[in-house]
Image (cartoon, rainbow, N blue to C red):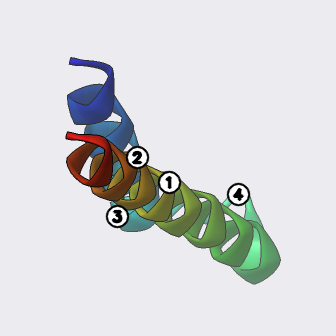
């Protein structure tokens, strides 16, 4: 369930844009979202290897 929320949060952050953050803020939010999704992928990959 934690993995689902990590993917959901990462996808939300990737899709989020806000004019008050400016261009740099939007880039930072996108990078954080991509990081969440990559972290979730690595967690799944490690769990599959341990089984």
The crowd level at tag 2 (other Cα within 10 Å; few <14, some 14-19, many 20+) is few
Q: Which mark is residue 9?
A: none
The answer for how far apart the CA atoms under marks 1 and 2 are is 6 Å
- Residue at left offset 76%, top offset 66%: 25
Whole-angstrom CA distance, mark 4 to mark 2, is 33 Å
Between residue 21 and residue 14, name the one nearer to us: 14
Say whether residue 6 is left or right of residue 18: left
Disc 3 target residue: 15
Closer to the observer: label 4 or label 1? Answer: 1
Check disc 1: other Cα within 10 Å, few if <14, some if 14-19, many if 20+: some
Q: Is residue 44 above or below residue 2?
A: below
- Cβ atoms under marks 1 and 2 closer than 8 Å: yes
What residue sits right under mark 4 in the picture?
20
* Pick the front one: 8 or 45: 45
Name the spot of residue 13 as percent of width and height, x first.
45, 53
User: How far apart are labels 4 and 1 at the CA level?
Assistant: 28 Å
Please give the residue where the numbered disc 2 appears in the rendered image: 43
| Disc 1 secondary structure class | helix
Residue identified by numbered label 1:
39
**Residue at figure coordinates x 75%, y 72% from the top left:** 22
Determine whether the residue tagged by mark 2 lies in a helix, strand or loop: helix
Q: Nearer the viewer, mark 3 or mark 2?
A: 2
Distance from Cα at disc 3 to Cα at disc 2: 22 Å
Question: Where in the figure is residue 51, as x and y percent of width and height?
Answer: 19, 40
């Amino acid at each position: 369930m934690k993995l689902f929320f990590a993917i959901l949060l990462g996808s939300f952050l990737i899709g989020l844009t806000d004019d008050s953050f400016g261009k740099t803020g939007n880039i930072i939010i996108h990078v954080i979202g991509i990081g969440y999704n990559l972290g979730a992928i690595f967690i799944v990959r490690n769990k599959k290897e341990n089984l």
